[in-house]
Image (cartoon, rainbow, N blue to C red):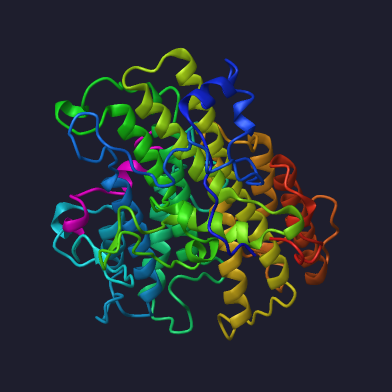
Amino acid sequence: MKTTLKSSLAFGLAVLLSACGGNGDDDAGTLGGNGDSDGGGDSDTAAARSYMFESRFSEGASSVAYAGQTFRHLLIADLTTYMESLVEGQDGFGNPASDPQTILDNLNFYYRFTSAGENAPYLLDTMPEATPGTTYGMVNSATTLSEKIAGNDNPLRRGELKGWTTDLATLTPEGLIDYWFSLIAENTTDNNAATDPTLTTEGQDLRQLVQKFLLGAVTYSQGAEDYLNSEAGLKAQNVRPDEGNEPFTTLEHEWDEGFGYYGAARDFNDLTDEQIADDIAVDTDGSGTIDLYSEYNWGHSQNSAKRDLGSSPAASTDFTKGAFDAFLAGRAIITEAGGALNAAEFIALEAQRDIALENWEKSIAATVVHYVNDTLKAMDDPAYDVNAGMTDNLVALAEVWSELKGFALSPQFSPYALLSDADFDRLHELLGDAPVLADGTQNGAAYTAPGCACGSPAEQIEGYRDALREGRAIVAAAYAFDPANVGDENGENGW
């Protein structure tokens, strides 16, 4: 396990430009990659370890800003907390609830946030306490998840949502969120005391599905498809203040917003993987509070650290450092250019974008492998009694399978994805929209798999385990993961 502080990576604009060799291909594998090299952090050309850049237009002011991105991370976190609080017949705040619309309204408070909620206290709890303030309006003005989900703010790369087929009339990410919300609302108010409102009898954990899907369809999609896209955010101007009077250029802001969606604290290089993975916020500026914009680790940045910690000593990964140092290097290129980027500078910027997104995507893919392994282990004894309702083991299976499925839906939201469309489609054909239960059913029907006789529940379960192993192999091959991190046939000895 990694316990040392992340070493700094030396880079200077001249080094970056010479390394790209005119086409960016050489540079794409040098900074970040697998994190094996320290990069010589003591070099005179080394940039700051922290994601901090001064304004060219306002002396003493920072040019880094991404409040909207932080706010959307907060909304996803609080929506998750709210879903965790739901119990049968109550609205999540201790009040009786018999109307599904009440629950839908509460869920949409976070997903379709409006200015009417700005005075409400947010649910996130940090230690020390967080700043700014205690209400949503103190963090940012009305900013929604709905307006930025893939398909609403940007076009779906493949024309429609892929990877989910069951009971979904509208093949859009928002349609899937609304479908899951409707199930949660119905489960909460259907007077079935044996049912956890966020769990389905098919073995789906709706809370996990919603959270992980939003991290892909909002934060990853926005970072990859919009702000870091060569045909979108990276085309922005770098000559004058954004909107006429901001302390940053439009290009600086676009890059920062992409970084904001990755979710790393600005002193990420000075944190251990344990601190990041364990959600330990560090008051690096000694103010006595945790700055939600700069000192808190959100979303996928935490999962990067979890996978780095879980990687084999024989095949250690450093997705955290690979992504963060590339974000730093790219921002340095933009800042040092001092104006419009020339051709070589733009190539170098794209190379750093590629490294940042590659490490970001690889950490998602490694998490898919991790939850395939957890699902294989949970299926060792998937006891389920339809008369008893949810058993502890089915709850455990639903949780890990749903995390697997939620993360696995993410690659479709990046134009730079390393996972091919064919491999993505095959992966989700293998996963299905629910796990296989102890009675051999998937989504209420007998499970069948190509090449599997599957005549008994035991055969159906083993057939699905084979499908999971095949899906894991597809992911491992697409991302060139070392076998030491992939796991064995039982899900052991890997991520």
Task: Give percent across and percent down for residue 366.
Answer: 64, 52
Q: Residue at 32% x, 31% y: name it.
A: 252
Query: Can residue 432 be seen from the camera position used here?
Result: no
**Nearer to us in this view, 51 or 23:** 51
In the image, is residue 490 above or below residue 215? below
Magenta stretch prevailing secondary structure: loop
> For residue 469, what is the image quadrant?
bottom right
| In the image: residue 401, left or right of residue 103 | right
In the image, is residue 337 above or below residue 331? above
In the image, is residue 86 above or below residue 182? below
| In the image: residue 263, left or right of residue 115 | right
**Nearer to us in this view, 467 or 76:** 76
Query: Can residue 465 be seen from the camera position used here?
Result: yes
| In the image: residue 178, left or right of residue 457 | left
Quadrant into which the C terminus falls: bottom right
Q: Residue at 53% x, 43% y: name it.
A: 41
145 falls in the magenta region? yes
Q: Residue at 27% x, 42% y: name it.
A: 65
Quadrant into which the N terminus falls: bottom right
Task: Give percent across and percent down for residue 169.
Answer: 46, 46
**Nearer to us in this view, 394 or 77:** 77
Task: Give percent across and percent down for residue 29.
Answer: 64, 33
Q: Give the extent of the magenta segment.
A: 136-154
| In the image: residue 100, left or right of residue 271 | left
Q: Residue at 56% x, 44% y: name it.
A: 322
